[in-house]
Image: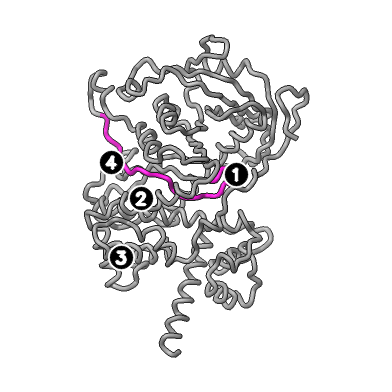
Amino acid sequence: MVTGRDTASKDVYSIKSLLQGCSLVAICELDVNRWAELNFGTCDLGDARRTRRAVKVARLMAEHPDGSTPAQCERWADLKAAYRLFDCDEVTFTTLAEPHWQQTRKQARRTVLLIGDTMSTHFEFRRQIEGMKQARNGSARGFLLHNSMMVCAASGEIIGLAGQELFYRQPAPKQTSFQRKKRERESEVWGRVIDLVGPPPEQTRYVHVFDRGADNFEVFCHLVEQRSDWVIRAAQMHRAVTDPDGQRVSVNDLLAQQPVWGTYELEVRGSFRSPQRTARLEVCVAEAILPRPKRMTPYLKQVGLEEIRQSVIEVREIDAPAGVDPLRWVLWTSLPVPSFAAAWRVIEYYERRWLIEEFHKAIKTGCRLESRQYLKSQRLEALAGMMSVLGVRLVQMKMLARSQPDHPAEQVVPKVWLEMLRVLRKGSKIDTLREFFRQLAGLGGHLLRTGDGEPGWLTIWCGLDKLLLAIRGYEAMRKRYG
């Protein structure tokens, strides 16, 4: 039971999924040939032959995503073609990834979340990579990739990437305070990607979900300009805001004055710092007016917004175990919060932020971007564009069996895949998507025991690699001997 603001008792309820609003079955293309053509067939690379080559390279990578480029291409001619492709000036991160961004934005329906975050890449310092700059910790070099991933708000299914920007960290020079204000700040990437994604189409709502790095008045202004909503975790708890009575107070003091609207439970995974537990959380809500900062940037002067009115939601853990830091989230949101149910929905939107961490893991671990032995940064940048789209496919495949496990496999999976998998798995029953992905993971090393849980995308990809190799061998034998 959801408890309202005016209810005396605060009942505890467990989080459940909202109504389904998107279909991952319709979005995720399993056949590697159609997937490669769909995502890279319209790339403008200056030559139609180059575009066809990009489609072929993408297909080879999709068949063996964690392999090196020689392992993916297998033949010397295909390997040389891949190297020439990534060495072309027209083949860049943007030209390879932009068609996917455009297709993703076209698929937006109703309310979608745009989860934003920055991923840093680290290549070993001893590697001599032409054009690569120093990364954060000084012991390695690499670039940063800011991603905006579109997720269905109702189901949590990943639709794709709506926009990205690849950039390098700029060292801070010694400057006067006046010069420092004019220097481009790294935090401006949030606003640039928001503008790249643009405003939502008709009858669609964009809700940008950001972590504390986006708690910046300029970010709020960009969102207002693009007619988008937001859920942003607050970082500046001592910032002065104006309460509904017109009093200037800090965010902390404002929240301390609010009554508890309701409570709920959250399962917290264990870590080396704290054990697994069921956390009991209280929710408070307040209205606040965020004034513009005293130090004005040229962008703020151009926009001219004096203040932004929004809600602030606090989630805090009560009765935390001894020695464990209690959970606490403070979220800014432009969404209306008239009730506890509405506040809980905003909290659930923020809880979906972990999906982008899964995407980053897919690029780094699943596609092994940082292990690629390319000698020029321009080639690695272009490779990152292709691998970004491949990383989305990898995470979507993992989620497909969990979001719609009972969907008939024959309606989604290529027929030859099902037939070959049944042969390799010795006649195992494969009628639904869950059964298909479990047997595919079994081919990749998952034991399928009751206590093993659902397979991850690494074992799924390992099984798919074996399945596609078996299909290639079968087709080669059929062509040779009839």
Instruction: Name the residue type under label 3.
Output: Arg
**In x, y percent, where is residue 147?**
41, 43
**In x, y percent, where is residue 338?**
64, 26
Of the 4 image quadrants, the one containing the N terminus is top right
CA–CA distance in space, label 3 to label 1: 38 Å
Q: Earlier in the sequence, mark 3 or mark 1?
A: 3
- Residue 191: quarter of image: top left
- Residue on which the image places disc 3: 53
Callout in the foreground (3, 4): 3
| In the displayed structure image, the side of residue 375 where residue 461 appears, left or right | right
Question: How packed is label 4: few (under 14 Cα within 10 Å), some, or many (20 or more)?
Answer: some
| Residue 155 lies in the magenta-colored region | yes
Q: Are marks 1 and 4 in contact (CB under 8 Å)?
A: no
**Residue stretch in magenta:** 152-172
- Residue on which the image places disc 4: 134
Q: Are marks 2 and 3 in contact (CB under 8 Å)?
A: no
Q: Nearer the viewer, residue 377 or 214?
A: 214
Q: Earlier in the sequence, mark 3 or mark 4?
A: 3
Instruction: Name the residue type under label 2.
Output: Glu
Q: Earlier in the sequence, mark 1 or mark 4?
A: 4
CA–CA distance in space, label 3 to label 4: 32 Å
- Residue on which the image places disc 2: 98
Q: Please, what secondary structure does the residue beneath circle 1 have?
A: loop
Q: Please, what secondary structure does the residue beneath circle 3 have?
A: helix
- Residue 217: quarter of image: top left
Q: Earlier in the sequence, mark 2 or mark 3?
A: 3
- Residue 189: quarter of image: top left
Question: How packed is label 2: few (under 14 Cα within 10 Å), some, or many (20 or more)?
Answer: many
